[in-house]
Image (tube, rainbow, N blue to C red):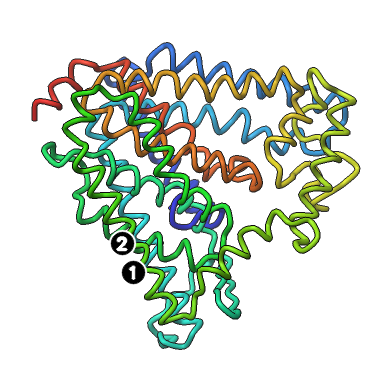
Amino acid sequence: MMLFVPTVYQPIKAVLLALVLTVICLSALIKKKISLHPLILLWILFITSVGLFFILRGLIYGAPGALRVGTVYVLWPLVYMILVAGISNITMLENIIRVLTIAAIAICIYSFSYIFYAIGWLPSYLYIPINLGQAIGFYSGYIEYNLYNISSLIFLVPFFIAALITWPKNIKMPVSRFWLWIGFLLGVSLVFLSGRRALILVTVLSPIITLFFRFFSSHKIKLANRKVVVKTFVTTFILVLVILFFLNYVYGINISVLVDIFFEGFDFQRSPSALARKTQFFALLDGWSQHPLLGAGHGAGVAYKRSIEQPWAYELFYIALLYQTGIIGFIIYISAVIWIFWYSIHIIKSNLFLSFLIIPVLVGMVCFLIANATNPYLGKYDYLWVIFLPAAFINCWLLSPNDIKKQVSH
């Protein structure tokens, strides 16, 4: 549900979350053991403490949203700590990857059903009107549609691309290449139909990011997997051309129009949204200059308000974080993310089964962090899993290296 219907149907998610947390806690009591490595525990408690410090600083400075953001920076990390402990073995991590795949295909199928319904190709009695903020526009040379779960594709489409490039054919993986290709075809089609600049950008960058993480694999693995990489790139290029031809034939999608729209997002003269981001960029930097070291605290806002209901919320997530936590807090948060990459690279270098699984997850995470620069996704519970899922892989690697080695032999 976090993937398919993010930000909505929270009461149902709350009940399900409570059940999952109860099962994990009862299991820990029965076993008299928490499946959480001390390093992961310390990492989560550290970022939670940092969040609490800046919330208190925000309260001192009268930040209007200090208490409201307490869930994001204090409560939800503690909840995710329990969830990480609940998926502490490789079988559960494989199941999570299967869930990612199922959710991605479900998102694509529903998205196409909405587009077909909006065009008039799908009768109303076959369309299920789930609350996902549906909106669509048909223009000359392109389409723009909106569903809340498009944000999940920012992680999932790069995930498919990375898995196709790096997963070997001679080892049984959690998801077959057939379903990876299905997810890729459907996902990339929606990338072009969505008109989302961030989604287009991360999709284009994902092969480069994948090759970066693949660089840390052993020479033996890279050599054995070279043919798969080459074939995947060639097939991907051909399929993208086929997708573009199909979309042009069916929907009138024009690649040159899409390219123009993409670069328009960086044109402050033509794009109102780009101008708004420029205005808030300088407003937040001016606010930061008044509190350069420790910031104004979580939940603080500047004179320029992007939202009346939430005057502390800005699209430029990282610049807002710099203003609210200062250079010291910003470095601390960045260091927490770098810590994930550091240990993840160690997993990749280990050349164990887990090293194949974690690369697509890391690529999805990097792409999501790139998109988060201009869209504050990480300010909501439904998206924090992007950070904590790699932490779960690290926790599994630290807790049971012997089990992982056995898995490779299979």
At mark 2, the secondary structure is helix
Judged from this view, the residue extending furthest toward the left is 410
Q: Quadrant of the C terminus?
A: top left
Q: Is residue 4 left or right of residue 46?
A: left
Q: Amino acid at mark 2?
A: Ile
> Would you name the residue on which mark 1 appears?
242
Crowd rating for badge 2 (residues with CA inside 10 Å; few <14, some 14–19, many 20+): few
Q: Find the distance from the CA under tag 2 to the CA under tag 1.
A: 6 Å
Viewer-proximal residue, 275 or 74?
A: 275
At a point 26% along the width and 32% down the height, the residue shown is: 356
> Could you say which disc has been placed on residue 265 in the image?
none
Crowd rating for badge 1 (residues with CA inside 10 Å; few <14, some 14–19, many 20+): few
Viewer-proximal residue, 182 or 247?
A: 247
Residue 208: x percent and y percent? 42, 40
At mark 1, the secondary structure is helix
In contact (CB < 8 Å): disc 2 and disc 1: yes
Q: Indicate whether 360 appears above or below 8.
A: above
Q: Indicate whether 83 appears above or below 124.
A: above
Viewer-proximal residue, 82 or 152?
A: 152
Q: Indicate whether 149 appears above or below 94.
A: below
> Would you name the residue on which mark 2 appears?
238
